[in-house]
């Protein structure tokens, strides 16, 4: 397979670097370039399982392309922050693809599907040293015709000791540590607490525009503040005693007076009611989520929030 020479490196601006290497690796199928753009000891955090080292990232990318050989990764936005020792990007991606090969979920279905992912990458000296990968596999499984409970059972069986240790540590940190400090932290904490923990309607109305639109998945749109409030009411209903923490916040200007805001957040809660057909287990679960918001006049006007519902379900089994 002809490889791209690798056009992006330490001299590239961060947004160009992120968009460029994604295109080279996926669209141009330069998978081996991962060894150039990712640190040898890179750590990728995902609720479905940790990935350690560039070699495993390469292997997982080849496996994804075997299952979805026409997969495209279309960048929707990159929101970033300067972290002192590096820069941390939050890259929202829409993927279109056809399941033409076998995958971890089963035999090829030859169905077309769309998937939204947010990849947060810490970039230091032109290489990705850490990544937080958040994608909701539930809409993908349903588009392909696979059963989510079966997929969650498989995920739970294959959860290794490294992933379980990380889940435990992340949950403990979420319950005890303070929010990351950023000029947008107060807004982000207020909105996430209202949507995911308290359900405070007054707070939601104060922070969400009447005409706001949420995009929970590539195939789902929720319009208006009342619709968004109802959507999150259903999302939080299966969980009790929730605690939420901000892990990363970034913001850039949008248009003249608006902002695009990215928030990576963690939530711990108890599975206390039916969730995706699974009765209350009373088990504690950890949620790794990312929200991209467009904010105008002090209110959220668009919401792209992601977490892996199947990986959360796997913790309930």
Image: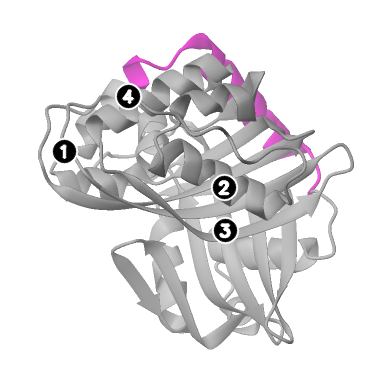
Which residue of the protein is positioned furthest toward the right in this rendering? 84
Does the magenta portion include 174?
A: yes
Q: Nearer the viewer, residue 265 or 30?
A: 30
x and y percent of residue 157 in the render? 33, 16
Name the front one of labels 4 and 3.
4
- Residue highlighted by disc 1: 146
- Residue highlighted by disc 4: 63
Residue 178 sits in quarter: top right
Which of the marked residues, 2 or 1, is nearer the chain's N terminus?
Answer: 2
Query: Is most of the magenta stretch helix, strand or loop?
Result: helix
Which span is picked out in magenta?
A: 155-179
The answer to whether 95 appears left or right of 252 in the picture is left
- Residue highlighted by disc 3: 291
Identified at 73% across, 67% down, the residue is 252
Residue 286 sits in quarter: top right
The answer to whether mark 3 and mark 2 are in CB contact below 8 A is: no
Identified at 84% across, 44% down, the residue is 83
Marks 2 and 1, how far apart at CA: 33 Å
Q: Nearer the viewer, residue 186 or 58?
A: 58
The C terminus lies in quadrant: top left
Secondary structure under badge 2?
A: helix
- Above or below: residue 53 compared with residue 28: above
Query: Any mark on residue 169, and which?
Result: none
Secondary structure under badge 3?
A: strand
Marks 4 and 2, how far apart at CA: 21 Å
Marks 4 and 3, how far apart at CA: 27 Å
Marks 3 and 1, how far apart at CA: 26 Å
For disc 1, the neighbor class at 10 Å (few under 14, some 14 to 19, many from 20) is some
Marks 3 and 2, how far apart at CA: 23 Å
- Residue highlighted by disc 2: 20
Which of the marked residues, 4 or 3, is nearer the chain's N terminus?
Answer: 4
């Amino acid at each position: 397979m002809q490889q791209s020479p690798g056009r992006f490196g330490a001299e590239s601006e961060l947004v160009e670097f992120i968009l460029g290497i994604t295109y080279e690796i996926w669209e141009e199928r330069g998978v081996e370039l991962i060894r150039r753009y990712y640190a040898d000891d890179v750590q990728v955090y995902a609720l479905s399982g940790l990935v350690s080292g560039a070699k495993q990232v390469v292997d997982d990318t080849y496996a994804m392309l075997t299952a979805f050989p026409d997969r495209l990764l279309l960048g929707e936005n990159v929101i970033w922050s300067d972290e002192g020792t590096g820069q941390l990007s939050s890259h929202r991606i829409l993927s279109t693809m056809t399941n033409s090969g076998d995958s971890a979920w089963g035999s090829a279905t030859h169905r077309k599907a769309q998937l939204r992912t947010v990849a947060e990458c810490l970039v230091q000296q032109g290489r990705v040293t850490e990544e937080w990968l958040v994608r909701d596999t539930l809409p993908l499984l349903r588009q392909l015709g696979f059963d989510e409970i079966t997929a969650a059972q498989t995920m739970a069986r294959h959860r290794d000791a490294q992933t379980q240790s990380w889940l435990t540590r992340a949950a403990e940190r979420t319950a005890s540590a303070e929010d990351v400090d950023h000029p947008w932290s107060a807004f982000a904490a207020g909105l996430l607490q209202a949507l995911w923990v308290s359900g405070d309607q007054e707070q939601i109305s104060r922070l969400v525009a009447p005409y706001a639109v949420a995009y929970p998945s590539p195939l789902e749109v929720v319009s208006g503040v009342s619709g968004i409030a109802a959507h999150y009411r259903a999302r939080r209903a299966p969980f009790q005693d929730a605690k939420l923490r901000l892990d990363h916040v970034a913001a850039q200007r949008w248009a003249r007076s608006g902002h695009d805001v990215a928030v990576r957040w963690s939530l711990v809660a108890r599975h206390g009611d039916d969730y995706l057909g699974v009765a209350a287990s009373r088990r504690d679960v950890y949620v790794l989520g990312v929200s991209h918001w467009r904010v105008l006049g002090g209110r959220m006007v668009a919401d792209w929030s992601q977490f892996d519902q199947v990986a959360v379900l796997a913790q309930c089994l």
